[in-house]
Image (cartoon, grey):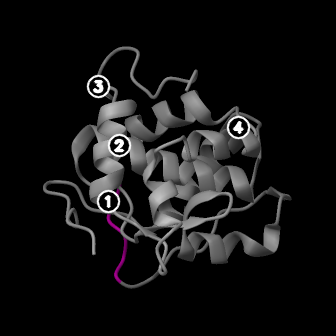
């Protein structure tokens, strides 16, 4: 079980809400994403948020699949798309209703999209599972759940950034 469960001051979101933010961001730029890109962008946002704030962005635990970390509910929602372009938003869980995103969360997600949104699935998959990442150790576990504590520690050490700085966002060169 993850030791980091609840955000103080900020609510956690269903993975679909974060994915939909990225889908809308892409569409507003005349760009479309495939399922793999959405899965990896959502995980990378969660991981970087944990690394910076020691608080989860996504409610459900991440899991380790062969092509990298993801969220099981989001994976199930996107499985029918395969690698096709997604031209619609995803249904979000109705109960409990997801809270509204604060300006800080939206700015953080915008910065993640700026850093990673132009990358292909294979590039995002590499970024989501670097050597020594929590994904590697979770793949050895039977349930394949990736600990938020491990994600926070790894991304704070390796890739932390200040989302409030003028050049806020994860480094696109990762």
Q: Are marks 3 and 2 in contact (CB under 8 Å)?
A: no
How much space separates mark 3 and mark 2, taking CA atoms?
A: 21 Å
Under circle 2, the secondary element is helix
Q: Residue at x 39, y 37 (%)?
A: 108
> Quadrant of the rendered structure where residue 127 is?
top right
Q: Which residue is mark 1?
A: 148
Image quarter of the N terminus: bottom left
Image height check: is 27 above or below 70? above
Nearer-N-terminus badge (3/1):
1
Q: Which residue is mark 2?
A: 154
Under circle 1, the secondary element is helix
> Quadrant of the rendered structure where residue 11 is?
bottom left
**Disc number for residue 164:** 3
Q: Where in the figure is residue 60, as x and y percent of width and height?
A: 40, 71
The region drawn magenta spans 96-103
Which numbered disc, 3 or 4, marks the residue closer to the eye? 4
Q: Where in the figure is residue 46, as x and y percent of width and height?
A: 42, 51
Q: Are marks 4 and 2 in contact (CB under 8 Å)?
A: no
Q: Residue 140 vs residue 67: left or right?
A: left
Nearer-N-terminus badge (3/2):
2
How much space separates mark 4 and mark 1, taking CA atoms?
A: 23 Å
**Camera-side residue of 79 and 9:** 79
How much space separates mark 1 and mark 2, taking CA atoms?
A: 10 Å
Which numbered disc, 3 or 1, marks the residue closer to the eye? 1
Instruction: Indicate whether residue 172 is drawn in magenta.
Output: no
How much space separates mark 4 and mark 2, taking CA atoms?
A: 19 Å
Q: Residue 26 vs residue 115: left or right?
A: right
Nearer-N-terminus badge (3/4):
4
């Amino acid at each position: 079980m993850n030791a980091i469960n609840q955000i103080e001051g900020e609510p956690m979101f269903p993975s679909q809400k974060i994915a939909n933010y990225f889908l809308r961001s892409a569409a507003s730029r005349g760009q479309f994403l495939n399922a793999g890109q959405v899965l990896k962008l959502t995980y990378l946002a969660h991981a970087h948020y944990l690394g910076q704030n020691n608080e989860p962005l996504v409610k459900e635990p991440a899991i380790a699949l062969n092509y990298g970390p993801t969220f099981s509910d989001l994976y199930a929602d996107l499985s029918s798309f395969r690698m096709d372009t997604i031209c619609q938003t995803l249904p979000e869980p109705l109960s409990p209703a997801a809270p509204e995103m604060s300006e800080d969360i939206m700015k953080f997600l915008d910065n993640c999209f700026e850093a990673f949104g132009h990358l292909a699935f294979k590039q995002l998959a590499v970024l989501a599972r670097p050597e020594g990442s929590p994904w590697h150790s979770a793949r050895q576990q039977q349930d394949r759940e990736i600990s938020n504590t491990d994600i926070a520690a790894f991304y704070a050490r390796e890739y932390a950034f200040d989302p409030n700085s003028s050049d806020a966002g994860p480094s696109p060169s990762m």
